[in-house]
Image: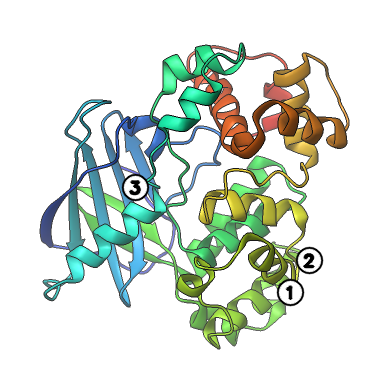
Amino acid sequence: MRRTTTSRPPIALDHCQVTRLHPVPPFHFDATVHKPSHFPSSDNHHEPGKYWQSVRFLDRHLGVKLENRGQTDSPEIKLSVYSNEPLRSGEVDRVASELDYRFDLHTDLSSFYAELGDDPLLGPVFARWRGMRVKACQSLYEFLVIATVLQNATVRRSVQMMENLFHQYGTRIRFDGRELACFWDPEALAAVEEAELRALKVGYRARALSLICRAFASHELDEMQMRTMPADELRKRLLGLYGVGPASVWYIMFEVFHHYDEVETVSPWEQKIYSRLLFGQESVSREDIVAEVTRRWGRWRMLALHYLFEDIFWKRKTQTVDWLEPLIRL
């Protein structure tokens, strides 16, 4: 059982309500709910065919369990929602709808496979992961926290910062025999002094974390409204946030808001990986990478990169990838 380190006792989520999710086929359950490229975090846990996640939603601490109950071409997910008291009428449907969006279950990818299936790089990857979706299991606020701790840090360092934040401000929840960390509300950090955040060894990121929390606590940012923005307007809005640069916006536009063509830049870490995957070279310029994927995959370029990226990390789960190991440093 995975545990968080905070000393506060966990909240027991003893009430469970069950519903079903029906992704648009094709759908690959494990490749959607679990991304081996993501750094490990104590707010979720994956086993083949099953996924547990803490969710701060509807002003509640919730636990969700997703179980694969279908096949690639006839998908179905059993969704169990755990709470400390029974959810009100319609709330389970709201949770289901939110997860449908976060896991991109409603999107029809048939054109993606039809248009790019003959690509020599993507064809074998499609055979392994057909139906994989982009995933952002956290809210926009939570994703911004993660993007902040990822900045200019090794994977090991990012994990340490995230767990320090969970320890200090998060809540442990217990459901379905598991104990996970759950995010805090933005209001919890909005009044926290930067010095207190720096004491958690987040370094210069303390200011960005503080200002992002205040933006959400004051309702300056509204994720639901931002989901409806045109891409250019959304990108500009995100770049206006303190500490959020082009590399973070690239992640957010793709993973949180599902813009499949969002490859405006490439971070140094991904630059090294894409250089290997696309060109078989140790280092290719960011400009050449963006130009190549745009020429090759057009409107699908970021989703195509996602497939290549996750494929190499799934491979790493069962065998050593010599050139990749030094880049991870977990």
Eyeballing the image, is 50 above or below 326? below
Determine crowd level at label 2: few under 14, some 14-19, many 20+ residues with C-alpha closer than 10 A: few
Residue position marked by numbered label 1 in the rendering: 207
Q: Which residue is mark 2?
A: 204
Query: Relative to the observer, which residue lies in front, 195 or 278?
Result: 278
Q: Position of residue 51 (x, y in %)?
A: 30, 41
> Do the CB atoms of the residues marked 1 and 2 lie less than 8 Å apart?
yes
Q: Please, what is the three-letter code of the amino acid marked with disc 3?
A: His
Q: Quadrant of the C terminus?
A: top right
Residue that badge 3 annotates? 106
Residue type at mark 1?
A: Arg
Residue type at the position of mark 2:
Tyr
Task: Kindly identify the residue that appears in the image at 59 percent across and 87 percent down.
Answer: 191
Residue at image coords 43%, 63%: 6
Image spot of residue 65 (x, y percent): 24, 48
Q: Secondary structure at mark 1?
A: helix
- Compared to residue 118, the image places residue 187 above or below, namely below
Identify the secondary structure beneath mark 2: loop
Residue 151 percent coordinates (x, y)? 73, 53
